[in-house]
Amino acid sequence: MKKLIFISVLLLSLLFGCKGYKETTFDPSKLNIINTAWDEQGNETYIKYEAPSVKDGIEALPFNIKLPKTIPIETDGYKPIIIDDLENDGKKLLITFRAYSKVENPDHPIIFKIRVYNFNIFPS
């Protein structure tokens, strides 16, 4: 009887414990590098990535993001995400989501932009 209870608790723990799991480290394996910067010693200090899709970009992040479903302008949806790894360690990330207006205006394009930081941009 004790074994049955133990096995039941173990199975329930596995089922519900892994349900909301999200990787806690930045995983750029599916991202394309579009820009890098180096210091005087030749070490990469900054990397800018572009995700092939919004889904791939969100999956690479070490935290969850929920984007607004409605956008205040008429668009074709969000374009691929730009992710800036500011210290090349996956700890300071700047994420940019963009959606461009369907209305053509070459002089003043309308862009809906969301920027997400995982660090304090106004240090005290």
Image (spheres, grey):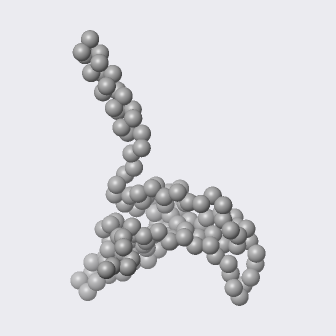
Tell me which residue sits at (42%, 39%) in the image. Answer: 19
Q: Is residue 120 left or right of residue 55?
A: left
Measured as percent of width and height from the top left, residue 26 is found at 37, 60
In the picture shown, does residue 51 fall above or below 8? below
Quadrant including the N terminus: top left
Tell me which residue sits at (52%, 66%) in the image. Answer: 81
In the picture shown, does residue 74 fall above or below 35? above
Tell me which residue sits at (71%, 88%) in the image. Answer: 107
Q: Residue furthest front?
A: 124
Q: Quadrant of residue 38?
A: bottom left
Quadrant including the C terminus: bottom left
Measured as percent of width and height from the top left, residue 80 is found at 56, 65
Q: Is residue 59 left or right of residue 41?
A: right
Can residue 33 be seen here? The reply is no
Q: Quadrant of residue 18?
A: top left
Measured as percent of width and height from the top left, residue 75 is found at 70, 67
